[in-house]
Amino acid sequence: MDKKILEYIRKNPGCRQRYIASSIRVWQCDSVFLNTLHSLEKSGLIYRENYSDPANMEYFYKWYLTDAGERAIMNTDRKGD
């Protein structure tokens, strides 16, 4: 699941959690999904920015890859060659 999350964020920087979950066909509040996201963030592969849209009464995170996350994806891509 973590590779799928990293690949989606790489292709869609600034994406929302609901779109990441939808792309891998899980519920955005699924405990395994949330734990994986937290683990990736804690290990420094991804980070989130708070986004607030008071006009629409929305508050959510936008997710991005770190440089370490980018390198991690590139290393896994090379293993398949």
Image (cartoon, rainbow, N blue to C red):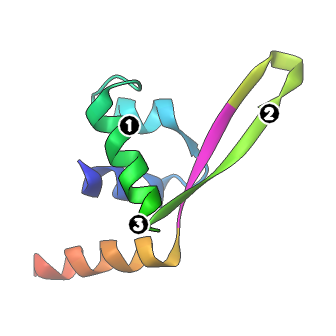
Question: Image quadrant for the C terminus?
Answer: bottom left
Residue 56: name its quadrant: top right
Residue 9 drawn at (x, y percent): 46, 54
Q: Residue furthest right?
A: 55
Q: Residues within 10 Å of mark 3 (few under 14, many from 20)?
A: few
Q: Which residue is mark 1?
A: 34
Q: Residue drawn 42% across and 39% down? A: 20
Side of 68 where 75 appears, left or right: left
Label 2 to label 1: alpha-carbon separation: 21 Å
Disc 2: which residue: 52
| Residue drawn 72% across the image and 28% down it | 59
Q: Is residue 24 visible?
A: no
Q: Is residue 64 magenta?
A: yes
Residue 1: image location, x then y, percent: 23, 47
Point 44% across, 77% down: residue: 68
- Position above or below: 78 against 19: below
Instruction: Tell me the magenta residue range.
Output: 60-65
Helix, strand or loop for disc 3: loop
**Residue 56 part of the magenta-drawn span:** no
Left or right relative to 59: residue 55: right
How far apart are labels 3 and 1 at the CA level?
14 Å
Residue 7 is labelled as none
- Residue highlighted by disc 3: 43
- The quadrant in which residue 11 appears is bottom left
